[in-house]
Image (spheres, rainbow, N blue to C red):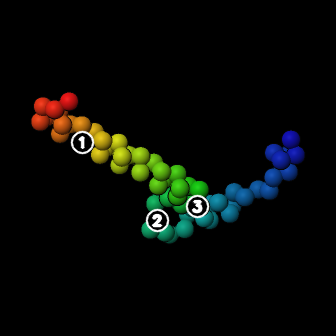
């Protein structure tokens, strides 16, 4: 329980971090772990879109 009670208040630090005038979108900010999750998400999205396009072209050509 001490981990929840004795945590330092970092609200002002986070507020300064997210309110800076940066051209980077907020969903990319947040450190290397968030960048990894974003890369994994968009990688999966690209693989899914590629697979769907491939299957659609095969179906249009009449092959199963």
> Against 11, is 53 above or below?
above
Circles 2 and 3: CB distance less than 8 Å? no
Circle 3: element type: helix
Q: Is residue 57 above or below residue 15?
A: above
Residue where numbered disc 2 is placed:
24
Q: Is residue 62 visible?
A: yes
Q: Which mark is residue 53?
A: 1
Is label 2 in a helix, a strand or a loop?
loop
Q: Is residue 18 toward the left or the right of residue 13 in the image?
A: left
As drawn, the residue found furthest toward the right would be: 2
**Residue at position x 35%, y 49% from top?**
46
- Identify the mark nearer the N-term, 2 or 3: 2
Residue for badge 3: 32
Secondary structure beneath dot 1 equals: helix
Q: CA distance from mark 1 to mark 2?
A: 31 Å
Residue density around tag 1, few if under 14, some if 14–19, many if 20 or more, within 10 Å: few
Residue drawn where x is 69% and y is 61% of the image: 12
């Amino acid at each position: 329980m001490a981990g929840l009670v004795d945590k330092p208040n970092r609200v002002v630090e986070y507020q300064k971090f997210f309110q800076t005038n940066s051209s980077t979108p907020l969903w990319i900010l947040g450190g290397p772990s968030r960048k990894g999750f974003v890369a994994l998400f968009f990688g999966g999205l690209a693989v899914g879109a590629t697979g769907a396009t491939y299957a659609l072209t095969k179906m249009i050509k009449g092959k199963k």
